[in-house]
């Protein structure tokens, strides 16, 4: 057995790996929220040691102290605990997949996920031990990549569904694949640039900040363009139609959140008192609305990346199954992720 | 079978378009990678010199001599480090009479300085300045952090020791501890300066101390450059071969500066007159506002919409805009309208290249909004009118009697305040007759 052509009978073998992959993906999303909150509240160094927490074994840190302690410690320690959960789940996923009779490439892909999660944990630890913002930034970049990767895994493991439809035109699928891939690349770059904007630190040069702002805006425009193209292309492809609509919605929300993030942190740019309703408004540092908006912007960014990857992988599957001439058994089923 | 030529053309065209798209994508990725790379590297923890101010002193004098050599600059940096420490490890100048530094507490400075973090779960957070302020106000308090370029007004540059919303008399007088604390807790409405209500009192205290520390440090740096260094090319400041009397001179200068902070007290505010804020009081206030004595309307406009004189530049640009800036001293203050094709623009570019933010003229406040950045209590407004705002909004001189040609008596200042407070409710078309709101005394 080779390639992506997974047949119905394989599904029995893939059932548990698939369930676990979905679980890992679902558990990673909250982890990304909390991770975003760590940066938002600048809690990265709230706990000065690693892998221990204030000298305690990470798992044995008294929960009463954790719950009732300062907010930044609460967030940082919670982030570590949740990270452990995802790590253990990924371990389970690998163990189960390795024991199932699934194709070799699938096993390798799952091992790669395991490597990813370990690297991510290590990066997080080094960030604390070395107190390096650059590592924090890399840690923040790898997280969404892992999330999107897991989303992709879910798709390739999914139960093959009979679309009950004529196979979509190969040309449309190819275009879908190309555009979705480009959108995935751009949305990942957006995450990176956004991370740079968020990790403003001691040595940030104003000029670079300015360039990053420009890139971030350009990237947003590009993503709007891509999502519109995807919307048109996906019209005739049932397998991704709703996902694409969801993507468009997410991008819309994301732009609102981005604008909100800026306004709540830096005020409306270059506006003076000529706007009466803003003239008397005082920004509130560290307010709930600020934290929620910024962190949602980060998390939705990851969700957009995962969605574009999902569409791309699905398109890839469709292409393969079209090539293997069993279009009825499109290996990417309708399993929602 | 050969394909028709036209189709082939279309095909290649298609491909080139796609290639170009891919190329763009790659270029974009490469640019992002560069961005990331520059973000890497160790975080430097040194204060940088005030290059804009240095450049204003750099200009060749009549004899064509540039006053500050690179060695002198290095000396200034060394001396400043010796006096004030680094962003990670602040220290206080070793003055002969340390009492004048009572307004700074080293433990609070240490809490505000350094990288952000926490040593134990119950202890307080440290590195507060980097966590909360640095992206706007900059590491050395130059008000030119990475985000500053997008904000209007710009974040405060502490290094001249000048602050807008203070209760002390005199333009160059430092603010009181409470003034700074008020700004931090309340924020400045209508600007990017947020309210830090979420922080506890200990954290606010630490930050206020750190602001004062950065201000004193910046003022010392200016003095070193302007008064002490040029004489002897900075060499005497070299810690390797300290000249004892020079050192004493230096410390005395710092002590004088520190003394102004130590002595800062809020100005007295007399009680308002008995009829304050009744119709007559507001009418009197209006008369003064429009009149020649207070001159408020010359800037704020006859309708108080802030549409009067617009060629005002604030005190933080004086190194290159005002009469004190060596480079442009022979020019009238720059006007935005005459910028184009102006040789002075070239001079400005030199300052921009050294980190100065783009000059923007200051807009007199639209007083009909009822938004007061320096506080909305009547005493705040009284002090604002009586003491002015730095050099750009003139203070109302104290007069002996209401009939004096110049200046205002306390009661008249109160009447002006009454008028200002009535402005948001006054009709623009038929003012003064139509005062619809009588308000209570404070």
Image (cartoon, helix red, strand yellow):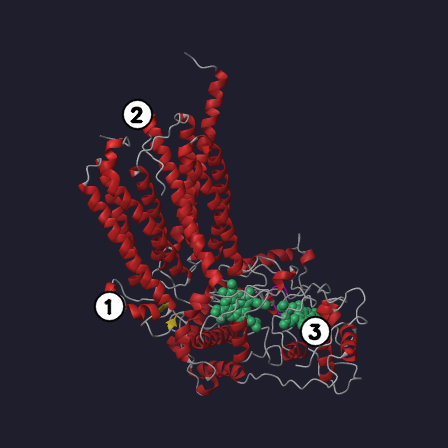
Give, as a single range, the part of the protein colored magenta: B324-328
- Distance between the alpha carbons at the discs numbered 1 and 3: 59 Å
SS at badge 2: loop
* Residue underneath mark 2: A324
Residue A145 horizontal/vertical position (percent):
35, 47
Residue A3 horizontal/vertical position (percent):
27, 31
Left or right: residue A102 versus residue B65 is left
- Tell me if mark 3 has few (under 14), some (14-19) or many (20+) residues whose alpha carbon lies within 10 angstroms of its own: many
Quadrant showing the C terminus of chain A: top left
* Residue underneath mark 1: A56
Q: Determine the residue located farthest toward the top in the rendered image.
A: B1
Left or right: residue B442 versus residue A60 is right
Q: Do the residues labelled 3 and 2 touch (CB within 8 Å)?
A: no
Which mark is drawn over residue B421?
Answer: 3
Q: Nearer the viewer, mark 3 or mark 2?
A: 2
Overall secondary structure of the magenta stretch?
A: loop
- Distance between the alpha carbons at the discs numbered 2 and 1: 56 Å
């Amino acid at each position: 057995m080779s390639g992506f052509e997974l047949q119905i009978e394989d599904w029995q073998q893939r059932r548990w790996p698939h369930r676990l992959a979905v679980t890992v993906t679902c558990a990673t999303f909250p982890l990304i929220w909390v991770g975003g909150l760590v940066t938002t509240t600048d809690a990265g160094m709230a706990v000065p040691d690693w892998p221990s927490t204030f000298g305690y074994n990470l798992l044995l840190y008294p929960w009463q102290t954790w719950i009732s302690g300062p907010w930044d410690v609460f967030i940082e320690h919670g982030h570590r605990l949740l990270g452990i959960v995802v790590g253990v789940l990924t371990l389970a996923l690998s163990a189960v997949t390795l024991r199932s009779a699934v194709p070799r490439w699938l096993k390798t892909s799952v091992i790669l996920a395991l490597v990813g999660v370990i690297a991510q944990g290590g990066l997080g630890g080094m960030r604390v031990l070395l107190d390096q913002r650059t590592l924090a930034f890399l840690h923040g970049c790898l997280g969404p990549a892992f999330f999107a990767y897991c989303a992709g895994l879910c798709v390739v493991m999914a139960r093959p569904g009979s679309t009950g439809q004529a196979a979509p035109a190969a040309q449309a699928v190819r275009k879908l694949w190309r555009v979705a891939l480009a959108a995935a690349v751009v949305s990942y770059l957006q995450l990176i640039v956004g991370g740079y904007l968020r990790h403003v630190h001691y040595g940030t040069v104003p000029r670079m900040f300015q360039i990053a702002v420009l890139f971030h805006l350009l990237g947003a425009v590009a993503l709007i363009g891509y999502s519109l193209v995807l919307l048109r292309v996906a019209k005739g492809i049932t397998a991704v139609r709703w996902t694409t609509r969801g993507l468009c919605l997410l991008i819309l929300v994301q732009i609102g959140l981005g604008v909100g993030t800026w306004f709540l942190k830096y005020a409306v740019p270059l506006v003076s008192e000529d706007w009466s309703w803003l003239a008397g408004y005082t920004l509130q540092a560290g307010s709930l609305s600020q934290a929620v908006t910024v962190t949602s912007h980060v998390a939705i960014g990851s969700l957009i990346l995962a969605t574009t990857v999902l569409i791309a992988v699905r398109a890839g599957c469709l292409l393969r199954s079209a090539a293997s001439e069993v279009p009825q058994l499109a290996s990417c089923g309708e399993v929602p992720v | 079978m050969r394909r028709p030529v036209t189709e082939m053309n279309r095909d290649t065209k298609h491909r080139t378009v796609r290639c170009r798209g891919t190329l763009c994508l790659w270029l974009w990725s490469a640019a992002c990678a560069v961005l990331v790379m520059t973000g890497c590297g160790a975080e430097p923890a040194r204060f940088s010199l005030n290059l804009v101010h240095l450049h204003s002193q750099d200009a060749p004098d009549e004899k064509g001599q540039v006053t500050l050599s690179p060695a002198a600059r290095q000396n200034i940096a060394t001396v400043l480090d010796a006096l004030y420490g680094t962003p990670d490890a602040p220290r206080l100048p070793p003055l002969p009479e340390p009492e004048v530094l009572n307004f700074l507490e080293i433990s609070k400075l240490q809490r505000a300085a350094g990288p952000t973090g926490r040593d134990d779960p119950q202890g307080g957070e440290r590195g507060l300045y980097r966590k909360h302020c640095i992206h706007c106000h900059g590491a050395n308090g130059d008000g030119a952090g990475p985000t500053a370029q997008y904000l209007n007004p710009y974040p405060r540059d502490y290094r001249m020791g000048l602050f807008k919303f203070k209760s002390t008399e005199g333009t160059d007088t430092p603010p009181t501890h409470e003034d700074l604390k008020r700004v931090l807790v309340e924020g400045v409405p209508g600007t990017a300066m947020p309210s830090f209500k979420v922080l506890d009192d200990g954290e606010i205290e630490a930050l206020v101390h750190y602001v004062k520390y950065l201000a004193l440090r910046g003022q010392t740096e200016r003095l070193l450059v302007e008064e002490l260094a040029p004489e002897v090319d900075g060499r005497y400041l070299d810690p390797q071969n300290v000249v004892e009397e020079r050192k004493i001179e230096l410390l005395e200068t710092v002590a004088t500066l520190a003394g102004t902070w130590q002595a800062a007290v809020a100005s007295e505010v007399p009680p308002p007159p008995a009829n304050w804020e009744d119709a007559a009081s507001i009418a009197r206030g209006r008369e003064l506002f429009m009149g020649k004595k207070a001159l408020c309307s010359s800037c704020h406009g006859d309708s108080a919409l802030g549409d009067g004189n617009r060629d005002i530049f604030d005190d933080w640009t004086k190194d290159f805009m005002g009469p004190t800036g060596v480079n442009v001293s022979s020019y009238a203050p720059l006007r935005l309208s005459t910028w184009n094709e102006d040789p002075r623009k070239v001079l400005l570019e030199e300052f921009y290249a050294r980190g100065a933010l783009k000059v923007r003229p200051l807009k007199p406040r639209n007083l009909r909004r009822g938004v007061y950045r320096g506080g909305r209590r009547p005493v705040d407004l009284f002090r604002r009118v009586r003491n002015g705002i730095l050099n750009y909004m003139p203070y109302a001189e104290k007069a002996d009697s209401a009939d004096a040609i110049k200046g205002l008596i306390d009661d008249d200042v109160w009447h002006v305040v009454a008028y200002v407070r009535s402005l948001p409710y006054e009709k623009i078309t038929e003012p003064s007759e139509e005062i619809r709101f009588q308000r209570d005394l404070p």
